[in-house]
Amino acid sequence: MLDVGRHPNIELMAYSEVEQVEGSAGCFKVRVRRKARYVDEAKCTGCGACREKCPTDVLDMYNEGHSTRKAIYSWFAQGIPSTHTIDPDHCRVLQGKKCGVCQKRCEAGAIDFEQKDKIVELDIGAIIVATGYTVFDPGKIPEYRYKDLPNVVTAVEFERFLSASGPTHGHIDRPSDILARREIAELEKEESRLQKTLARYEEKAGASSQSVFEAFAAETAPPEQQQWMEKYREYLPLTEKLAALRSKAEGFTTAKRLAFIQCVGSRDLRFYPFCSGFCCMHSIKEAIIAHEHENATTSVIFGMDIRAVGKGFDEYKVRGGNKSNITYRRSRVAEIVNGPNNNPVLVYEDTQLQKVVREDFDLVILATACAPNEGMKEMAAILGIELNRFGFFKTRPENPLDTTREGIFVCGCAHSPMDIPESVAQASSAASRAVQTVTVTPAKLLKIS
Amino acid sequence: MKQNKTGENTEGLRVGVFICDCGSNIAGHLDCAEVTKYAADLPGVVFTKENLYTCSEAGISEIQNAIRENNLNRVVVASCSPRTHHPLFASSCAQAGMNPYLFEMVNIRDQCSWVHMGQRDIATAKAKDLVRMGVAKSTALEPQKDIESSVIRKILVIGGGIAGLSAAEALAGMGLEVLLVEKEERCGGLMLGLNVLETGKSAAGQVSDLAATVAATSGVTVHTASRVIEISGYIGNFRVVIETPAGKVEDTVGCIVVACGAVPLVEEGLFGYNGKDVITQMELEQRLASGSFKAARVVMIQCAGARNATREYCSRICCATAVKNAMIIKRKYPLAEVHVLYRDMQMYGDEKEQMLWDARGMGIKFHVFDQKKPPRVGDGKVTFQHAVLGETKEFTVDLTVLSTPLVARPESSQVAALMRVPCDKNGFFLEAHAKLRPLDFAADGIFVCGSARYPVTSVEARTQGLGVASRIGAILFKEKLVKSGIVAEIDQETCVGCMGCLNVCPYEAIIFNRETGVCEVKEILCKGCGNCASTCPSHSAVLRGYKPEQLLAQIRAI
Ligand SMILES: Cc1cc2nc3c(=O)[nH]c(=O)nc-3n(C[C@H](O)[C@H](O)[C@H](O)COP(=O)(O)OP(=O)(O)OC[C@H]3O[C@@H](n4cnc5c(N)ncnc54)[C@H](O)[C@@H]3O)c2cc1C
Ligand SMILES: Cc1cc2nc3c(=O)[nH]c(=O)nc-3n(C[C@H](O)[C@H](O)[C@H](O)COP(=O)(O)OP(=O)(O)OC[C@H]3O[C@@H](n4cnc5c(N)ncnc54)[C@H](O)[C@@H]3O)c2cc1C
Ligand code: SF4
Ligand code: SF4
Ligand code: SF4
Ligand code: SF4
Ligand code: SF4
């Protein structure tokens, strides 16, 4: 990424979208909308000083909403360019309120609340479409209860949990436990507020809340202490609830018994008939990494086939089974239900014994499908190219990078589901097709004349 | 003004030191003003400046103005990581007329403000130490020149299968010259022997068309029935010798593509293989193509000879081949019974999985078996234990087809030896980086594509062939190759010829000169890793820019 950012022949236009493509191979006219960042790209050095003091917290979608970022932010620390961006939906100034903290903090003078979208027109010889994929929303499969069981997460969320820079700093905390801890923190805030109020009453009256409460119950207390007692009545159940939560939290441990469910949304005629190609491998990878973090971790991977189809992949899969406590179970999970202690319980058929099995886990990870990106149809219309029956950009096997319009090429998951090595190889091929389009050869000259 | 050979101003040392605040990233945690003041009194320093952001346009022009106005002949920047910023500062110094190798960088962000956050005094003191060391080293630096070499815009492609042909087509399409060497009489590779592809088109037809197009393209020379017998030299300038039916041909090329493919395994006795009623998918393809296929009950056995202790890998293409051929049989003879016994059906991606749906729809039966209990073949029967249902099944068959893996060609180790590139334990060529550089070798200027690297479908082989073309274009479209002057040198007087350096050099950059009896560095191949310098017992090998006296100057300043 850094190399691309620094390459003299590459102009990066991040936070931008293609709106119109006219002309033909060799001489396209492309209109690009450069969205307003409210930060001057030429001045911003990416130092992050603005971010530190911004008062507005926003759910961080880079961490799949498991942590927060500020209204002025960079998508992730190593992002290129490092230019920060103000999120206009949340920034106080851009929402018409008062703030401007970032502007004061920015010593480069890069903040510009007046910035507008810019339209640029480019002369382009060839176009490569590499718009990738999106992950399937497992909420569409009601029997897996992704929406209401906290300890059922997607592989992308789990990827963030495993990351040292992720929301849990690489510890596999269970989302139900994270929620409980967050609740404790909020209740503690409330508790300390109430404690302060009560202390004020106590000081004034020179009596403890508890004694007044008892007197109140015996109806011997003066009525002007009504308000005090109302606060105390709020306080009592709160402390009880906190105590209960705290004692529960003492028992929290990281997730150690993991289940991976494969083909969630893939190879499923209700959603996508195709195989997403990379999810078997990323489940194995995640299970191996989880085991590296915590040796007691065991994983069960539920799938129809394990598609470990790449150089060294099958060997990796076998090693995962031998050395990383992974069990591969050939089965399609029918349903997930809630068990005690928020443990998801998987219901599936043991085909050999021909009976239904219920097995509970600490955490369930869904290997969600590689779905065609949102806006594929719109993108296809802008580019004037066709989609295939699966929703990806159409190509022919004889010329696997060429779309249906001359001079426009496609690579990576916009072409079809594939892993990183294949995407990288395809990217080189698309580049080669693009160079061929713009190279003038004797044969082409002959054709024109 | 006195000048040395490279035009440097040698009239005393004139060091300029620039201290970056990095906004508040550095200045927030240590006292940059004090460090700047401190630097001003260091020996050789004639100019100091504290910048808000040294890397910004304003900061860079301050450096350049200072070089011009104060005749600086050394620049030290104390800021962030040299990994990200060294190239920017060094090239900016060069623009202002200073030799870029006289630039030195000190990292006071990662090493001071970050690690000693909240300990302002400690961070400031350490920053002073590091700056002092940096200045000391800079005074010991010597000017260097970039190393340049010419490039020959011609490419040798070894192997004329679909991968090599696609590479040749794309390279020629970019206006480059290609030398394609195929050991057989005809180009086309494995596809010449196949029946039809999953698209229904003739495999031989497709690849022959491509071979004809490539052969007719100007700039491409095809040598069939030929072999490469010698390769020497380095990126940009390889000398190659080819043995052709018309005698030896010698040529020079800038880059090399390895596309020598793989072959399907044939193993006597494997599941009763006999080439008659137990055959490979390849033989089935040939029977289907020639019309000699005759069978009403067919069983295909997947992973025959693969994913086991001897060959641990999955061959990627044989599941799709089996499904394709099962469908061809079923389409032609709807009453035929076709069973596929498998461990995992590797129908990855969109089109292949769709084939699997369609195949099931046509009535082809798929059964899982366990590796530990493989099927038994004999007496016109195939018996196996169904891994899902747990029961034993038996089929009476006319023909058993083994889906055997693609294995490395026996001669690929010789091809590898010609260029000293590595193969993996299965004999496939080993790329530089499995994820990020799948088509490159670690050695510069040599690339790999197709089944030579790992089994692939013809579509993937073609994709990779096209892909190496752009990897090569990025090198050969340059006027000349320019690389850093930070390379090793070996003192011819003191070297004792022990060859210790030769053994530790990962890039084959050191040669032993038989005439002089000492080692020499091939600058163009050296990557400046320093292995040789730290190994040499006679201290004859040194790395420019990191010579002992330069490092000692830095260390003594602690
Ligand atoms: C949980 C998980 C783990 C994985 N782990 C691995 C692994 O370990 N190894 C591996 O090989 N693969 C892994 N993969 C697969 C890997 O993510 C893909 O192979 C790879 O990301 C494909 O790259 P791409 O560039 O085609 O698409 P993407 O990564 O999707 O990139 C597309 C880019 O295009 C941008 N874009 C989209 N639309 C537009 C538009 N209209 N205009 C401008 N820009 C646009 C997007 O913002 C995005 O930056 C994993 C996938 C998942 C889901
Ligand atoms: C039974 C079977 C069925 C298949 N069916 C399909 C299918 O339906 N669809 C599909 O997409 N793919 C199919 N394939 C895969 C397809 O054959 C390969 O993807 C393709 O052949 C790979 O091309 P390649 O150029 O990498 O290698 P190859 O085809 O092996 O070509 C390599 C070439 O290099 C030459 N060579 C080797 N060593 C040297 C040397 N030292 N010097 C000079 N020349 C050398 C060889 O003679 C050969 O011509 C099938 C494969 C098999 C075995
Ligand atoms: S906007 Fe200013 S404060 Fe924020 S990262 Fe950019 S330069 Fe730093
Ligand atoms: S102006 Fe907006 S972005 Fe800046 S600090 Fe305030 S809320 Fe954050
Ligand atoms: S890669 Fe594996 S999990 Fe993903 S869709 Fe294919 S078979 Fe299912
Ligand atoms: S592609 Fe299929 S038959 Fe071939 S080795 Fe892999 S799993 Fe076995
Ligand atoms: S510095 Fe490294 S690459 Fe260069 S000759 Fe020495 S060992 Fe080889």
Image (tube, coloured by chain):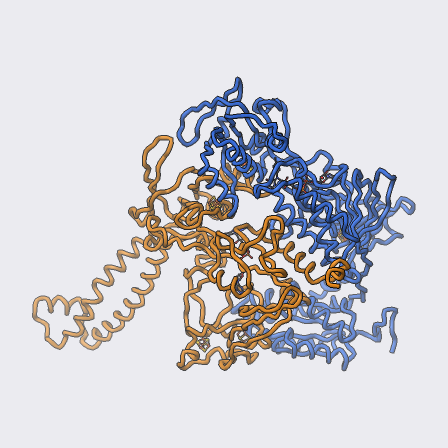
Indicate the position of residue B467 as horizontal and vertical percent values: 66, 52
Horizontal side, residue B15 vs residue A64: left or right: right
The quadrant holding residue B286 is top right
The quarter of the image holding the C terminus of chain B is bottom right
User: Is residue A384 something that shows in the picture?
Assistant: yes
> Quarter containing ligand 2?
top right
User: Is residue A16 something that shows in the picture?
Assistant: no
Q: Residue at x 49, y 44 (%)?
A: B354
Indicate the position of residue B269 as horizontal and vertical percent values: 60, 22
The quadrant holding residue A31 is bottom right
A47 shown above or below B544: below
The mark tally for this picture is: 0
A261 shown above or below B529: above
Horizontal side, residue B63 vs residue A100: left or right: right
Q: Residue furthest right?
A: B515
Tell me the colour chain A is drawn in: orange
Q: Residue furthest top?
A: B379
A233 shown above or below A342: below
| Chain identifier matching the blue colour in the rendered picture | B
Q: For this rendering, which residue is in front, B1 or A307?
A: A307
Indicate the position of residue A373 as horizontal and vertical percent values: 48, 58
Q: For this rendering, which residue is in front, A77 or A274?
A: A274
